[in-house]
């Protein structure tokens, strides 16, 4: 009989801002668990998870990589995710299938912009997480300041369970406030000792603070705290796990992954606090989570083309998946045969006979399965909610230098879009050019470089263009549109009256009907809404998508024979197009929040440059001897900014961006 000790499995992701140390943390986990026998280093290009040549050249993670390890009798499936904003869609797809996460923070920089972005993504998916404050050995490292930033900027109940032993370059260990034991690293592995006498008073004070904070948010802990005036080690540990699983609080640890200090306690915390698959809510209508005896329910979250074939990464939620199984892809309605099931170790794989509920594996065989598709037993169809794909904001025209390569270019672009749903390929109807759209300049650079390397294509790339939107500033009321078509046989008749108005907030479209008395049947109302959505694809100002619009159907007339859903959908589309032409609209442009870190002497030049790029300064502060400037800047003005910033700061300035929505275009 199939069974799975799913309480001894942890499916987790490593999340962070770029350069906070995610990949180094993952490498140390692999080394300490014995999964690899040599430490990989990002700066040497020897890491296991950053195996793509571009990742090693650029020193950043571009795509999520899954690895497996074992610790204290538990199997860990670890996904190292990108930290750069241009690849946030990779994080989104990973979070959709993970049970827990470790959020890594830089002890000097604290909560950085992309840290906040991935944290909000994890919030949306309800993923429990613990925090690891990395780089405690650097000058300016401050655990307390980082914990305060987590509480203030992320709104999290942060519960530090460690006290650093030593500061900055003298950091050599931690005091475990739950067990009240010290761990130090002096050239060898972890050594457990009594709490040093000089830190005992501080450790007791922090332990008391931890108990009080836990008692405030955990009923059982509060009861014991009120009765005994303190919490036992066991009660405290159980409460920390319960709070983590519920997403009520976040356990905070610290260390220096690069110096191999603090990673073993992190592994202990992963096992102790993060959820097993059985701790997560059931999916697919199952009565209990990760039932290996139930019909198959799995979600495909990543597609990867290798020189030997196409691999589809899946998370098995219910049932089992074996070699030779036939599964139903509910996105297409097609059945696919599984020819191999693979356990993945970054760019290496090992074949397994079966994947059970709770497993994350790759399968070979499916030809048309896309990321986000549900795979299930053909006799028990289920549809799981797919990961949300971000809308592209930057586009470039791409063409082959040799006309004979046009077909190969089309095939290469199709493969890129298949592997990365946030890349969109289309043909410009006016110029006939092939346009590749993505989430940022770097995102497109990486995609084009893959075409050149993997497909051996010589391509010409146009200047990046941003994706504009159109929105209503002042609408119209009572716009009447009559659709009548009679060309022999059954005709088409639809009569609609629309009001169009601006829609506040971040909503893109809202549709309501105030028609009474059954003058327009409900199925025709839905057809009008569908037609209005069709009309939003191209606005009257420049053919850009229209957003921020409220449409109200106020009246309509039907014909007993000639009215149909098609007629009312056509009427809705034409009526809204006419209404938009009669309304006052404005263009919206994508903007980004830019955080620039520069030496103090360069602040003036940086502020002037941001102003020339139509930037709006929102914050400026000094941190660790450098100045940090935050501004909102139109995305179109950021092309080539990296080169300009290096020139103005003698190569010492850095910047990060994250999407900040759309704002009206100003001349």
Image: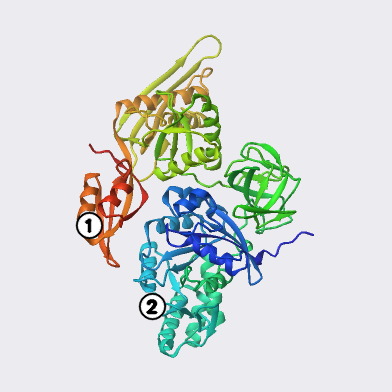
For the N terminus, the image quarter is bottom right
Question: Picture quarter containing residue 462?
Answer: top left
Q: Quarter of the image containing the C terminus?
A: top left
Residue 317, image x, y percentages? 65, 54
Picture residue at 49% right of the left edge, 51% below the top: 55
Q: For the view shown, which residue lies furthest in the bottom direction?
A: 197
Where residue 587 appears, as percent x and y from the top left, is 30, 35
Q: Residues within 10 Å of mark 2 (few under 14, many from 20)?
A: some
Is there any visible trace of residue 130 in the rendered image? yes
Q: Residue at x 50, y 32 (%)?
A: 522
In space, the residues marked 1 and 2 are separated at their CA atoms by 29 Å
Q: Residue at x 52, y 23 (%)?
A: 564
SS for callout 2:
loop
Q: Is residue 633 above or below residue 259?
A: above
Disc number for residue 420: none
As displayed, is residue 219 above or below residue 26? Answer: below
Specify which label sits upstream in the sequence, 1 or 2: 2
Query: Which residue is drawn at the image coordinates 38% and 69% (left, top)?
Result: 146
Please give the residue where the numbered disc 2 appears in the rendered image. 167
Residue on which the image places disc 1? 603
């Amino acid at each position: 009989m199939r069974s799975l000790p799913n309480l001894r499995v942890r499916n987790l992701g490593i999340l962070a801002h770029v350069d906070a140390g995610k990949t180094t943390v993952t490498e140390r986990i692999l080394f300490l668990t014995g999964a690899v026998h040599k430490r990989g280093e990002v700066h040497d290009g020897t890491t296991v998870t950053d195996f793509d040549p571009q990742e090693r050249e650029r020193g950043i993670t571009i795509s999520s990589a899954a690895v497996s390890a074992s610790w204290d009798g538990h199997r860990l499936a670890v996904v190292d995710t990108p930290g750069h904003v241009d690849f946030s869609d990779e994080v989104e797809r990973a979070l959709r299938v993970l049970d827990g996460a470790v959020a890594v923070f830089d002890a000097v920089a604290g909560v950085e912009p992309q840290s906040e972005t991935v944290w909000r993504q994890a919030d949306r998916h309800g993923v429990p997480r613990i925090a690891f404050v990395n780089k405690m050995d650097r000058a300016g490292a401050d655990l307390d300041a980082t914990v305060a930033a987590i509480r203030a900027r992320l709104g999290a109940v942060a519960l530090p369970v460690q006290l650093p032993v030593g500061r900055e370059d003298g950091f050599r260990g931690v005091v475990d406030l739950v067990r009240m034991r010290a761990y130090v690293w002096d050239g060898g592995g972890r050594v457990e000792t009594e709490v040093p006498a000089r830190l005992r008073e501080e450790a007791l004070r922090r332990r008391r603070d931890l108990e009080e904070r836990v008692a405030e948010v955990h009923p059982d802990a509060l009861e014991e705290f009120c009765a005994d005036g303190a919490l036992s080690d066991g009660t405290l540990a159980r409460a920390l796990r319960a709070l983590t699983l519920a997403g009520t609080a976040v356990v905070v640890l610290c260390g220096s992954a690069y110096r191999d200090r603090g990673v073993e306690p992190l592994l202990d915390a992963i096992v102790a606090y993060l959820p097993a698959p059985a701790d997560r809510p059931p999916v697919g209508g199952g009565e209990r989570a990760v039932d290996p005896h139930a019909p198959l329910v799995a979600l495909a979250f990543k597609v990867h083309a290798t020189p030997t074939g196409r691999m589809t990464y899946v998370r098995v939620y219910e049932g089992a998946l074996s070699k030779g199984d036939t599964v139903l892809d509910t996105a297409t309605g097609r059945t696919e045969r599984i020819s191999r099931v693979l356990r993945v170790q970054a760019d290496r794989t090992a074949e397994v006979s079966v994947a059970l509920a709770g497993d994350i594996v790759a399968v070979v065989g499916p030809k048309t399965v896309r990321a986000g598709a549900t795979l299930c037993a053909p006799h028990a169809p289920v549809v799981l909610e797919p990961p949300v794909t971000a809308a592209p904001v930057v586009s470039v025209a791409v063409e082959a230098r040799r006309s004979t390569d046009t077909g190969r270019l089309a095939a290469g672009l199709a493969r890129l879009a298949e592997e990365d749903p946030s890349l969109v390929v289309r043909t410009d109807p006016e110029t006939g050019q092939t346009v590749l759209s993505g989430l940022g300049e770097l995102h497109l650079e990486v995609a084009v470089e893959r075409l050149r390397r993997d497909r051996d294509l010589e391509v010409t790339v146009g200047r990046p263009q941003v994706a504009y939107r159109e929105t209503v500033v002042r609408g119209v009321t009572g716009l009447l549109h009559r659709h009548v078509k009679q060309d022999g046989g059954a005709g088409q008749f639809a009569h609609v009256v629309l009001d169009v108005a601006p829609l506040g907030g971040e909503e893109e479209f809202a549709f309501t009907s105030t028609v009474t008395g059954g003058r327009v049947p409900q199925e025709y109302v839905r057809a009008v809404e569908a037609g209005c959505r069709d009309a939003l694809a191209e606005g009257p100002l420049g053919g850009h998508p229209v957003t921020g619009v409220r449409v109200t159907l106020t009246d309509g007339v039907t014909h007993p024979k000639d009215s149909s859903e098609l007629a009312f959908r056509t009427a809705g589309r034409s009526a809204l197009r006419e209404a938009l032409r009669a309304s006052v609209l404005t263009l919206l442009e994508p903007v980004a929040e830019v955080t620039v870190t520069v030496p103090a002497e360069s602040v003036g030049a940086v502020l002037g440059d941001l102003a020339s790029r139509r930037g709006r300064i929102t914050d400026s502060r000094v941190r660790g001897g450098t100045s940090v400037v935050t501004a909102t800047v139109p995305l179109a003005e950021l092309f080539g900014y990296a080169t300009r910033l290096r020139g103005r700061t003698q190569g010492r300035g850095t910047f990060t961006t994250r999407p900040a929505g759309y704002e009206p275009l100003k001349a």
